[in-house]
Amino acid sequence: MSGWEIFWKSFLEHLKEHFTIGSIGDKINEAILQVQHYVQVGDVKLVITDAIIVTWISVAIMIILFALLTRKASIKPTTGQTFVEMLIGVLLSSAEGFGLSKEEARHIAPMIGTFAIMITGCNVISVFNVVPPAKNIGFPVAMALVAITYVIYISIRFVGFKGFAKTFTTPMAFLFPFKIIDTVVKPVSLALRLFGNVFGAFVFMEFLHIICPIILPAVLGLWFDIADGMLQAVIFSYLTIYYVGEFCEVGHEMKEHPELFVKKKKDKKKKSTDAVEAAAVE
């Protein structure tokens, strides 16, 4: 048997194995389960999952990419610099659209941009047939907790604790418990939205790779691996900006129109005085 005959025989056998469907449930279950490694540091055993490793790789790639895009920044911008400046402009205009001042928008832009870049890199890396970190529920939960912590911190910094606290009792004090629940639900919503979309896309693409491993996954991967991954980063960042604007809205109103809040107190005092006078007359 010649070398070419051996090659084609081996090639056809591997191709046949590749197209053999077998148990779809077992293959998808195998793809979903996370890979865990343990590193012993003294008496402590650290768990290193595939999500952590892929996150490090994705962040490193995105840092290198943006460094290359802006390495020759000048007054006459390059194509890469123009692209980055356009993204920053969209970020700033979105923040100002939610009621933040230009100074406040510039202040939160680096953090919000970091969220967007990190999530984009971690989602888009699936185009290289690498498991996205958001498939592990721990990744979106961690991102959501960091985001809501930052939202609360930066809101207090912008409008002060009094302005921030006033948000929970405006327009009516009895809304306080509902606003607390809303604040708790915000990170849950961020985490589940990111996890659900990425996990669903991942399972769907794994299913396509099993039943039709050549053409269809490559075509649909342009949406589920790239476009949808970027869209989730945009939604996460957009909602984070929205939450900052929502918490700062009442505080800004207090700074710009303090008489509105003082007037309410005077009206209450006036009503109580009128009631006392009316009672005295009777």
Image (cartoon, rainbow, N blue to C red):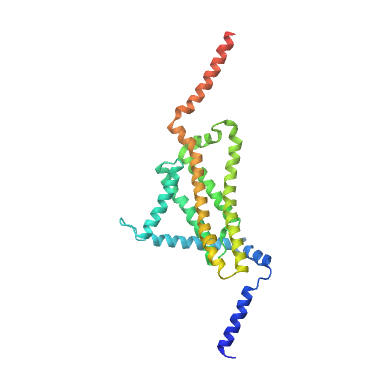
Residue 185 image offset from top left, x and y in percent: 60, 44
Dividing the picture into quarters, in which one does residue 48 lie? Answer: bottom right
Q: Is residue 210 above or below residue 251?
A: below
Q: In the visual, does 61 lie left or right of 7?
A: left
Residue 43 image offset from top left, x and y in percent: 62, 61
Residue at 44% across, 33% down: 255
Along the viewing direction, whichever of 12 and 267 lies nearer the viewer: 12
Q: Can residue 41 be seen here?
A: no
Residue at 58% across, 83% down: 8
Looking at this rendering, what residue extends furthest in the left direction?
75
Q: Is residue 241 above or below residue 2?
A: above
Count of numbered circles in the view: 0
Dividing the picture into quarters, in which one does residue 68 lie? Answer: bottom left
Q: Can residue 154 be seen here?
A: yes
Residue 25 image offset from top left, x and y in percent: 68, 65
Q: Quadrant of the N terminus?
A: bottom right
Looking at this rendering, what residue extends furthest in the bottom direction?
1
Q: Is residue 139 above or below residue 7?
A: above
Q: Quadrant of the C terminus?
A: top right
Residue 61 image offset from top left, x and y in percent: 47, 63
Residue at 60% across, 51% down: 192
